[in-house]
Image: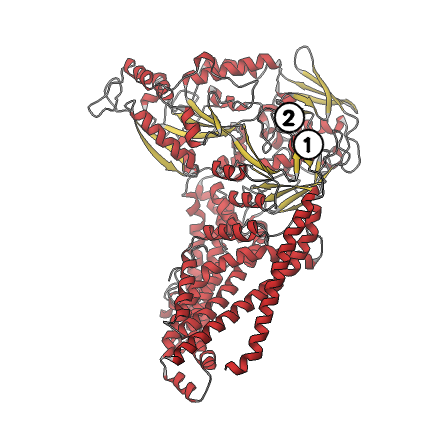
Amino acid sequence: MASDPSLLAGPSPDGPASGGLSGEKTAGGSGFGRYLRGRLTGSVASLVLVYLSSFFIFRVLGGDPLQAIAKDRRMTPEERAALREQLGLDQPLLAQFGKYTADVFSGNFGTSYQYRRPVMELVLERLSATVLLTGTALVLSVAVGLWVGARAGWRHGSRLDRAHVGVSLTLWSAPTFWLGMIVIMIFARQFGLFPVGGMVSHNVGPGLLAETLDVAHHLVLPAITMTAVIYAQYVLVMRSSILDEIGHDYLTTARAKGLRDDLVRRRHAIPNALLPTVTLVFLQLGGVISGAIVTETIFSWPGLGRMVFESIGFRDFPVLQTTFVLFSAAVIVANMCADIAYWFLDPRVRKA
Amino acid sequence: MEARTRAIMHTTRRGWRGLATMLAAVAVALAPTAGASAETHKKESDTLVIARGQSIDSLNPYFARNVIDFETLELSYETLVRLSAKDYSYVPGLATKWETSADGRAWTFTIRKNSKWSDGKPVTAHDAAFTYQLLIDNEDIHTRHVDFASKLESVEATDDHTLVITTKEPTPLVPSRYLPIIPKHIWEKVDNPAEHENNDPPLVGSGPYQMVEHVTEQFIRFKANKNYWDGKPEFDELVFRYYSSPDAEVAALESGEVDVVGYGSLTPAQFKSLKGQDGITANAAQNRRFVSLVLNPGARTKDGKRFGDGHPALRDVKVRQALHTAIDKSQLVDRVLDGYGDPGVGPVPKIFETLHWDGGDELITFNLEAANKILDDAGYERGKDGIRTMPNGSKPLKFRLYAHSDNPAYASIAKFLEGWWKDLGIEVQTESIEQGPLNDKNYLGEYDISFSGWGISPDPDFLAMHTCAALPGVTDGTERAHETFYCNPDYDKLQDQQTQETDEAERAKLIKEQQRILYRDSPQIYLYYQNQLEAYNSAKIESMAVQPADGGLITGQSNFLWAYHSARPVGSGADSEGGGSGALIAGIVVALLAAGAVGFYVMRRRTAGERE
């Protein structure tokens, strides 16, 4: 199973037991306390590593932020020197790192070179847009994916099963930018049902209802495109979990009690099959804030993913550093939550 | 068997029910919005919507960087002198007339009496003096504009309508410098004008459109200035709408969401697809940009210290001329640009007619034989493998060619160059590199040949990048004022003269001579001036002024946005109906879907018992 190509890469969804360093060796404490401590240590260690690499990883790329700042304009040497000093780029790398660390611990994530505004302000401004889009797509794809997957698995081998799996895998394999353009061409350009891009219109009157509807109107195409691309993973996971359950005796017992086929599936098979999907949902939850660069770009959605993309070209180090830490932290925390949830959901983890 | 078929049919029908439920949900979410857009569409005929791909950086007039910053300033504020739509010549702006003193150092501007700030106060010479004085007084602003600011001696408003600017030495930059005049009564309250971002609407300005709303990376909305002295704009509102993909811009023009596209230029394919469509006018305009090759003539510091690893053959002007002679620029225009452009000569593009040098009878024409002869005569003989070597036989003529990886045109050009230069006995290895690291290599002198593209402003200060003074003082590649380590005292002399020459015709002569020297020495080979490919909704816009008048552009005008100030709407009525019917269709489709879905669902519910 691949992870969503349009989300910033998270760790591979290889199960809940992968979290960080081996906290299991820590002695003492009750079962859950020890387990929790292990997970926490692992997460904190990962965060520290992420933080360290965040500073150096983008500077290894090469390139001079001043070049991007200057654009086509000719810069005099005096101006260059002044700007370099202003941005702190005249300092040795280690001194810059020291300052970055000091700033971060005092809650200051720096000022963007590109937008010349505090990074946190920029991030918060775009966070809601991203969460709205990826969150909607996540909810939709989980709902549709699980629903379709459960039915496809229940009737595996049927025409319906083949059709569902075929369609979802085709969409999964379709390049997002291509699918997005097709969707725009048909629904926005040809039929004029939806706007081509953006999140708000310039000509919507004030009022909460009008504004909400306007955003919803803009949300439809990007959310559906993103859902179409990512729901296949839930279909496949759910389908295979159902297949695992389908031969079990407890289902036969349920049928013997005289339950309808529908109810056997809904009340008995699905709850047991849900477990693996929990991991998947949690992993994707971490990816929600890193957004979907491609979808955001095609639909001109003002989210975080696109800001990061533009910052790479610009060598906007403060933005890159902060978002890198933020995105990684989200994935790490989500993984940790998955681990903790597993403790309660799956008795086998408790015995490990 | 029977049972199984029934089971499948059963599930299939269930699937349909799910789909219907989903459609109903979407339809419900959508229906009111379709109605809302039908209402707003009617007003759209008064609004000019322009697709943009950039976000605002800063609207501080001294620190603006992005094209969209400048355009927002150009709409909101005015300059003393404007560059005409006809041919970039000077025409009155806030100043009705201006004079130079006999020694060329004192400039007297008469400020018009009929211009007002958007808060109702009159614009006076004191505002202008305040704006220019900051260039002298404020340290940060001074540094940012040092090439111009260091020439200023004093600025004075002798009365409400007379501004006198005195310079230390004669300079033609006073009228040509782009500097929007800001309201003194607002800005004198600002602590440090250098740190004032000025991004929050409404701005107090005196230009043709005033910014009233700005939603980051969504849109910027302007309202027409009804009191604008040069005539109120005919569109009541102007909107810069943000798109992050050029394909989306094109789709938005076709769907009627925007009216003007082309900032950053469309691709020839996009342009051709728009060209034949009803209600869309496509404009292939002259542009202010060139694409060039920079040849490494030997990286060095101001003190003459050599560094980098450029190929020694490129220090020889003969080799550079041979390479230049072996480029078929017309073919590049035809094949790479689909004909939308002009072969390049000097760094000042054809669009600036008065300053552009056309090559005269020194124009180099594509001639492989002549190019080969240049190299033969200079002693670069072919080895056994057909590749030439240095006259002393030490090194084969194998050049690295660096292309920016984000520019597909460069990759196609490189293919042509490899072919032509192979016939010269020169081997070229093209490498595609990301922009940042490529620039690093250039300034470290670690390249042989590399692509370089620039947009040129009406005052071609780009020429200063080829002077000896622009050479770096250090070898670590951090001083980047130069273009390709070129240094020639003859050229520098002309540069000094033209930056002090206040007679326009005389100055044009000097600038042309500079271009001639660059052309002859070929440290940089100008391949072509690509067209700006743009399009607009001619069902809504009757006409717009282009700059210059002859084959000029709409998007990317200089100093004053003539196009939007002059844009005239097509007689209202027809177009608003079109917008309404689109929304009406949407509404009908949605209503049908909703009704169908709900009906289907209800029916399924009613018969559920029987089917179970």
Judging from the image, what secondary structure is the residue with disc 1 in? Answer: helix
Dot 2 corresponds to which residue? B85
Give percent across and percent down for residue B194: 64, 35
Q: Return the mark for residue B482.
A: none
Looking at the picture, tell me which residue is in the foreground, B65 or B226.
Answer: B226
Q: In which chain is the residue bearing label 2?
A: B
Say above or below: B19 vs B544.
below
Question: Which of the marked residues, 1 or 2, is nearer the chain's N terminus?
Answer: 2
Q: In which quadrant of the rendered image does the N terminus of chain A lie? A: bottom left
A168 sits left or right of B389 in the view: right
Q: Which residue lies furthest to the left in this view?
A: B384
Q: In which quadrant of the rendered image does the C terminus of chain A lie? A: bottom left
Pointer 1: residues within 10 angstroms few (<14), some, or many (20+)? some
Q: What colouring style does the render use?
A: secondary structure
Residue B428 visible, this orientation: yes
Marks 1/2 same chain: yes
Looking at the picture, tell me which residue is in the foreground, B78 or B346.
Answer: B346
Q: Residue at x 46, y 72 (%)?
A: B12
As shown in the figure, which amino acid type bears the numbered disc 1? Ser
Residue B66 visible, this orientation: no
CA–CA distance in space, label 1 to label 2: 10 Å
Dot 1 corresponds to which residue? B566
Q: Residue furthest bottom?
A: A257
As shown in the figure, which amino acid type bears the numbered disc 2? Ala
Q: In which chain is the residue bearing label 1?
A: B
B310 sits left or right of B596 in the view: left
B263 sits left or right of B10 in the view: right
Query: Based on the displayed image, in which of its 4 quarters is residue B140 positioned?
Result: top right
Q: Are marks 1 and 2 in contact (CB under 8 Å)?
A: yes
